[in-house]
């Protein structure tokens, strides 16, 4: 057999005698890392000490909780496309990362976590702050490794970065025993370019592309569904060219939102449980589904037994395990969509599907009358989340990065914000992690300092990681926070109203004075109670030079509709809830 | 078409999963949690070397539907350190298990019944001590369990059986074909 790992030389040819901790820093620099989000502690102290010697090349952001560090790294990775790096100590430091690791795993975010571990001879002895983080993180990491000798550091770091960023990206964890941080060895860095047991990108088979093109050229009512795969493959331009030549209407999963501008004439809207009306019902009326870099999540498909039974399915996907996992593909085009889409675009005929698109537009009109109009231009007294997003659109024209937390505000933002740019939306999709928003917005701003970053957050989720206001005050990252405060766990409350006979079990929150809290953390804040103040308040927020906290009082019973109730078919999407 | 549209009563049967991997710490755990997470029980599991130098082989037997097994195998293959994973029905592999029985030596000496039983079952004696004798039987589960039933009357002191080991009915290791295509195989195995 050939070698398990193939590597290439880097600029430094000379070996340097150094410690493991210093080697960690040098390895990170070789991988192009500029920023670490982290929190120090006993078992990672040698690495933190080495950090001081490299502070000209690597910045560190001290969060207030390890969960804040990993969500920030996720936000950073999602807007930059680079690997987010997180550092934490052993035991509780490491376990506090787990939620973020699970989130990054299901949303395919490239992350490298570095955790300290007790010294190797103490492994398995229940030493102070020892926990089996390799075991705990195994189901939620793409790969992980326990380093017990300093000599392993360069090779393992090279592999970790290669694995995290290649193919379908994901989180990787490196646990480093303290003795390996202290120990000395001759450091030399070689970048990893291949691991023989790992096929990050299957080679696109022209035969499959040809079959797909044949189906597309024959179809009367084809329908494109796109997801984050387009973004992860940096294939937004290739995707747009495909959509435009095909003339086929396209709809997105939540993580695919900014892969095609919202106002593009072929963008029909969002799929799934809280997606649009037309996009859901047309799924069961099309004759061909073309899924591009998406995984048929249950929130997108509803009841699988009644999901597009009439349609043929083409699935363009990088991960072989996703093919036929939920929906059977008639033609599966394995590979990176960056490569497969241009091949497909070449083979398809330029078409115009205006009659079919008109059907979408007619359904859209119904949704507009029943839902959208009332969300965006409410005639009732209370403020709606929809009108906040509408004003944000008017003022920014979609030219900002939007980050959300999880819940009603997340769905409203996805539905109404007019995404225009690539990598301009950061949200927790697959895991639905409350508390994600504030730290992720911070990470996004660090990754894209020249862009305006607006966080939309609910009062529930905000309080899960509210301590990160302290981190934001320390970095003065100018993120604009809009708190949609309805004094409730809104989405759960909505389900209770619709499906649990209005039995509101534990969804009311007695909230603090958020403006005082923000001010206590040194962040300027303002509260909006009534409609006439909203426009000016949003303008003031956007004009402000530093971080800003805007609280908007939202009407309590502002529900997210349309909705595909859990277990229902996409064609059973409801537009209204009879109170 | 949704996969659930297929008839729900798809037949459960034994599948032998062969996963070829690097020999790294923790990989066994990474593989087994794929089964645990999907609530699939592992009937037997054997980790061994393969015909290709440096490549380890996991042989896992499960009793489930083809669809479930297919999905599990794709997840196994997705692991960074797994080169390739396959699954086969019992017809498609040649497989064996091994059983060891410890019985009192007194039973062997006191009559010729036991000796006949051992011959009949094509079992063999591994070791004879004054107190006990160890018998070995290789075969299918039903074979070695049949011997176990016959030995019970002599008083079985200890009994254990191994997981399944299996080779496919193809002439060479399936992995070798894959590695050759990927340009990863050196002449060493090819010249065999």
Image (cartoon, coloured by chain):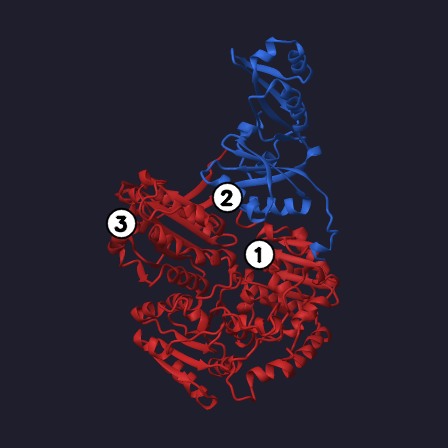
Chain colours: A red, B blue
**Which residue is at the front of the view, A485 or A455?**
A485
Label drawn at residue A63: none
**Residue denoted by label 1:** A339
**Gap between marks 2 and 3, in whole Å?**
30 Å
Find disc 3 in the rendering and name its residue.
A46
Secondary structure beneath label 2: helix
Is residue B130 rendered to the left or right of residue A26? right
Visible residue check, residue B149: yes
Across the whole image, how many numbered discs are drawn on residues?
3
Along the line of sight, which residue is nearer the eye, B183 or A167?
A167
x%, y% of residue A572? 69, 70
Q: Position of residue B69 (x, y in %)?
A: 64, 44
From the viewer's perspective, is residue B188 above or below residue A79? above
Same subunit under labels 3 and 1?
Answer: yes
Instruction: Point out the image quarter for the C terminus of chain A.
Output: bottom right
Give the distance between the C-alpha atoms of the residues marked 3 and 1, in whole angstroms.
43 Å
């Amino acid at each position: 057999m050939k070698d398990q790992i193939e590597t290439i030389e880097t600029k430094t040819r000379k070996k340097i005698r150094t410690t493991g901790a210093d080697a960690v820093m040098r390895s990170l620099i070789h991988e192009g890392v500029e920023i670490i989000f982290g929190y120090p502690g006993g078992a990672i102290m040698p690495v933190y000490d080495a950090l001081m010697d490299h502070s000209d090349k690597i910045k560190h952001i001290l969060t207030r909780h390890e969960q804040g560090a990993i969500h920030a790294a996720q936000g950073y990775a999602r807007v930059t496309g680079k690997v987010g790096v997180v550092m934490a100590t052993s035991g509780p430091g490491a376990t506090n990362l787990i939620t973020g690791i699970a989130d990054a795993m299901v949303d395919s975010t490239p992350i490298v976590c570095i955790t300290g571990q007790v010294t190797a001879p103490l492994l398995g002895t229940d030493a102070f702050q020892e926990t089996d983080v390799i075991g705990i993180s195994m189901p939620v990491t793409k790969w992980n490794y326990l380093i017990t000798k300093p000599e392993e550091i360069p090779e393992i770091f090279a592999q970790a970065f290669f694995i995290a960023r290649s193919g379908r990206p994901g989180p990787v964890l490196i646990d480093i025993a303290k003795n390996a941080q202290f120990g000395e060895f001759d450091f030399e860095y070689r970048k990893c370019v291949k691991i023989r047991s790992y096929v990050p990108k299957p080679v696109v088979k022209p035969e499959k592309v040809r079959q797909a093109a044949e189906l597309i050229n024959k179809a009367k009512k084809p329908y494109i569904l796109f997801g984050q795969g387009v973004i992860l493959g940096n294939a937004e331009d290739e995707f747009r060219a495909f959509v435009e030549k095909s003339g086929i209407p396209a709809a997105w999963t939540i993580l695919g939102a900014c892969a095609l501008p919202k106002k593009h004439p072929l963008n029909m809207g969002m799929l799934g449980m809280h997606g649009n009306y037309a996009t859901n019902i047309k799924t069961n009326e099309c004759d061909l589904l073309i899924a591009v870099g998406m995984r048929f999540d249950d929130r997108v498909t509803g009841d699988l037994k009644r999901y597009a039974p009439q349609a043929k399915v083409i699935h363009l996907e990088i991960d072989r395990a996703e093919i036929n996992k939920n929906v059977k593909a008639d033609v599966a085009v394995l590979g990176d969509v960056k490569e497969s889409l241009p091949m497909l675009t070449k083979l398809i005929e330029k078409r115009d599907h205006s009659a079919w698109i008109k059907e979408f537009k007619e359904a859209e009109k119904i949704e507009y009358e029943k839902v959208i109009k009332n969300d965006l231009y409410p005639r009732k007294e209370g403020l709606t989340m929809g009108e906040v997003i509408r004003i944000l659109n008017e003022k920014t024209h979609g030219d900002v990065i939007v980050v959300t937390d999880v819940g009603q505000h997340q769905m409203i933002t996805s539905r109404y914000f007019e995404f225009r740019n690539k990598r301009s939306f950061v949200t927790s999709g697959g895991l639905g992690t409350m508390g994600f928003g504030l730290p992720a917005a911070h990470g996004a701003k660090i990754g894209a300092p020249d862009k305006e970053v607006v966080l939309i957050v609910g009062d529930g989720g905000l309080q899960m990681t509210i301590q990160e206001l302290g981190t934001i005050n320390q970095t003065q990252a100018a993120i604009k926070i809009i708190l949609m405060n309805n004094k409730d766990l809104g989405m759960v409350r909505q389900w209770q109203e619709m499906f649990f006979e209005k039995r509101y079990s534990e969804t009311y929150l007695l909230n603090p004075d958020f403006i005082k809290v923000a001010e206590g953390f040194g962040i300027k804040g303002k509260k909006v109670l009534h409609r006439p103040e909203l426009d000016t308040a949003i303008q003031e927020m956007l004009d402000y030079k530093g971080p800003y906290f805007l609280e908007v009082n939202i009407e309590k019973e502002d529900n997210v509709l349309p909705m595909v109730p859990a277990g229902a078919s996409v064609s059973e999407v409801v537009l209204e809830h009879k109170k | 078409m949704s996969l659930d549209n297929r008839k729900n009563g798809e037949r459960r049967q034994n599948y032998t999963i062969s996963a070829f991997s690097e020999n790294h710490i923790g990989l066994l755990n990474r593989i087994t949690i794929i089964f645990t997470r999907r609530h699939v029980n592992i009937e037997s599991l054997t980790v061994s070397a393969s015909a290709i130098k440096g490549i380890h082989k996991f042989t896992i037997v499960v009793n489930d539907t083809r669809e479930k097994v297919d999905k599990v195998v794709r997840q196994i293959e997705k692991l960074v350190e797994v080169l390739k994973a396959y699954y086969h029905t019992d017809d498609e592999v040649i497989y064996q298990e091994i059983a060891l029985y410890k019985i009192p030596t007194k039973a062997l000496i006191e009559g010729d019944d036991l000796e006949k039983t051992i011959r009949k079952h094509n079992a063999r004696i591994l070791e004879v001590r004054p107190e006990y004798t160890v018998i070995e039987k290789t075969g299918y589960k039903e074979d070695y369990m049949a011997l176990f039933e016959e030995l019970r009357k002599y008083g079985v002191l200890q009994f254990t059986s191994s997981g399944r080991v299996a080779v496919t009915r193809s002439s060479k290791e399936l992995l070798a074909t894959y590695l050759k295509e990927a340009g990863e195989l050196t002449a060493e195995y090819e010249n065999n």
